[in-house]
Image (cartoon, rainbow, N blue to C red):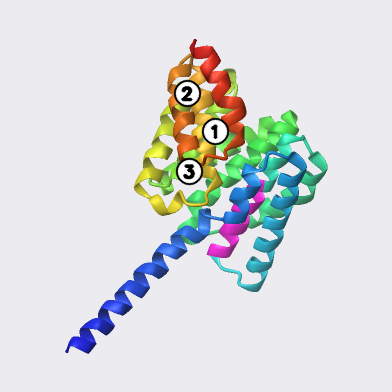
Amino acid sequence: MKTKTLMALSIVLTIASSIDCTAQSLESNPAAYQAYLSRSTTDAQKAWVNVVTTAEADAKTTPTDDTKFKLALAHYGLLNATMRSMDEATFKKYIDGAVINLESIKGMHAGEAMAVLAAVHGLQMAYDPSKGMFLGPKSSSLLSKARKSDPDSPLVWKLYANSMFHTPEAYGGDVVEAITAYEKALSLYNTQKEKTRDNWIFLDTMAFLGQAYVRHNDPSRATAIYEKALAAEPSFGWVKYNLLPNAQAKAK
């Protein structure tokens, strides 16, 4: 009886460990995390290309919703990274594949995939504002559906917050709404700890929440958020050398 009990306990622990690893393996990606932290624009972009290449190979070898979603996150990271140097050539090289992959994702990741697709459309509009007439409403609709489909996803709330932060007020942007959504995303990350490990999007949430507070003329709260970001990742150079000193100067 004792042996059977121990075997049963071992099976339960194995299953629990497997579930935790699965949760970590989607948003959590050590290579992507380091690419995001790189202070060299050139090195960061090269690292992101490697992240995408690895994810593409995995999705091709094992085409599941999980591998497709990991590829979607890799694509989003690379496309986002091109904004640092406005490398439109690299953006154009990957954008079509990113959109096709995102539109193919169904099942349990469908809501988050819609939010990532909305964010990708936002990047398309950043490179070509003339696309705003068509992609703006499409992006807003995708984010609305994503929040209804997956209201407990910190990723969905983070990307919705990005939209509110980056969209001009005349076109529906709202910094107060962005702050509320960023705070919601952080609250959800704090209750889903497995998603905070090696997850660059978690760090990015704090970086942009701080910027939203600065824009809202509350640099003291921005400073507090940046300090939390550095507690989570002491080598977060963007916050340490740029965002935090700027907020501290404004708070004086």
- Point out the tag, 1 or 3, that comes first from the N-terminus: 3
Residue 220 visible in the displayed image: yes
> What's the amino acid at mark 3?
Val
- How packed mark 3 is, by other alpha carbons closer than 10 Å (few <14, some 14-19, many 20 or more), is many
Identify whether 231 is placed above or below 220. below
Q: Which one is in front, 238 or 159? A: 238
Q: Which mark is residue 156?
A: 3
The reply to whether the magenta stretch includes residue 68 is yes
Q: SS of the residue at dot 2?
A: helix
Q: CB under 8 Å between callouts 1 and 3?
A: no
Q: Which mark is residue 162?
A: 1
Q: Position of residue 160 (x, y in %)?
A: 50, 36
Q: CB under 8 Å between callouts 2 and 3?
A: no
Q: Position of residue 180 (x, y in %)?
A: 41, 29
Q: Nearer the viewer, mark 2 or mark 1?
A: 2
Give the CA separation, mark 2 to mark 1.
Answer: 16 Å
Q: Which mark is residue 222?
A: 2
Q: Which residues are magenta?
A: 66-77
Residue 172 visible in the displayed image: no
